């Protein structure tokens, strides 16, 4: 076995994953709650209103982290799909299957909060511009992956079909990221991840980053919990199948 593949297999041992996440998951959950509590108080009570958008700017403390997680999570899904297809990573398929509903939730919240923010700013709940449309496509990719991986009786076949869909949909991620630069849209351009100085005042930027960290920790905790549940479900199914076979032989 190639050295690189052997390393992936070592990291993917399901038993080791369950042992590590037994203590990592509570730690992540507590950290996420603490950081989100600080971010919520900071963002809602202490950060100033925007000079143009007023109090509605506070929607950003949920909307922007959800957008980051929608794109970053899908990039993680693509990586898991490559690991599953190329290296037959024994944990990747389970993690990808359990990640897609969480990614769909984050993307759905991104669309919902964006619509709530767009109504007072643009005078409408929705516009078919490049950014919003590409994020909607990303949402459909997440939902499609979740449905496709569960559409087959054979989990391995569902994992392969889902991985192919995820890889095909990867082309949409840079479209989401750079759509405001490539096309003239109503959506504001990037304000944080810019080569120049961020376009946000530090009194708004810092609580945004804290909330982004908190939601990222929560996303990771949900993904780990779902993957643990998926692994335990597979173990239970394997035990039930083995018991049924022994009963047939007897």
Image: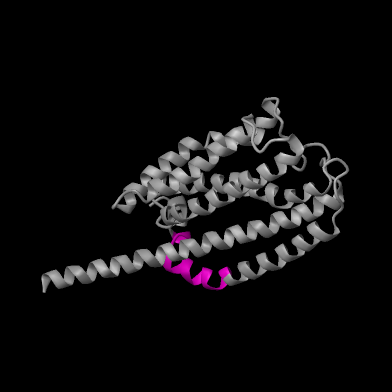
* Residue ID at (62%, 44%): 111
226 within the magenta span: no
* Residue ID at (50%, 47%): 77
Comparing 46 with 210, the one in front is 46
Give the quadrant of residue 135: top right
Q: Residue 74, percent across and down?
A: 54, 45
Comparing 152 with 92, the one in front is 152
Coloration mode = one colour
Work out whether 227 lies above or below 149: below
Q: Quadrant of the C terminus?
A: bottom left
Comparing 174 with 42, the one in front is 42
Q: Residue 164, percent across and down?
A: 41, 40
Comparing 124 with 217, the one in front is 124
Q: Is residue 132 left or right of residue 229?
A: right
Magenta span dominant secondary structure = helix
| Range of magenta residues | 10-25
Work out whether 220 lies above or below 50: below
Asked whether the viewer can see residue 1, the reply is yes
Q: Residue furthest left?
A: 250
Asked whether the viewer can see residue 82, the reply is no
């Amino acid at each position: 076995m190639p050295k690189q593949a052997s390393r992936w297999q070592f990291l993917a041992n399901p038993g080791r994953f369950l042992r590590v996440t037994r203590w990592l998951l509570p730690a992540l959950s507590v950290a996420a709650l603490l950081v989100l509590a600080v971010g919520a108080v900071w963002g809602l009570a202490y950060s100033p209103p925007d000079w143009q958008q007023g109090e509605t700017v506070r929607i950003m403390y949920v909307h922007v982290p959800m957008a980051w997680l929608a794109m970053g999570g899908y990039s993680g899904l693509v990586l898991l799909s490559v690991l599953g297809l190329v290296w037959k990573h024994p944990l990747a398929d389970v993690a990808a299957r359990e990640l897609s509903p969480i990614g769909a939730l984050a993307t759905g919240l991104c669309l919902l909060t964006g619509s709530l923010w767009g109504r007072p700013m643009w005078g409408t709940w929705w516009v078919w511009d490049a950014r919003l449309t590409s994020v909607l496509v990303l949402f459909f990719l997440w939902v499609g992956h979740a449905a496709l991986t569960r559409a087959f009786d054979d989990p391995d076949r569902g994992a392969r079909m889902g991985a192919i869909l995820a890889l095909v949909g990867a082309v949409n991620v840079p479209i989401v990221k750079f759509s405001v630069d490539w096309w003239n849209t109503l959506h504001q351009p990037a304000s944080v991840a810019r080569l120049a100085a961020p376009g946000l005042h530090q009194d708004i930027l810092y609580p945004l980053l804290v909330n982004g960290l908190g939601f990222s920790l929560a996303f990771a905790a949900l993904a780990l919990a779902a993957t643990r549940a998926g692994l335990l479900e597979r173990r239970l199914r394997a035990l039930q199948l083995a018991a049924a076979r022994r009963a047939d032989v007897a």
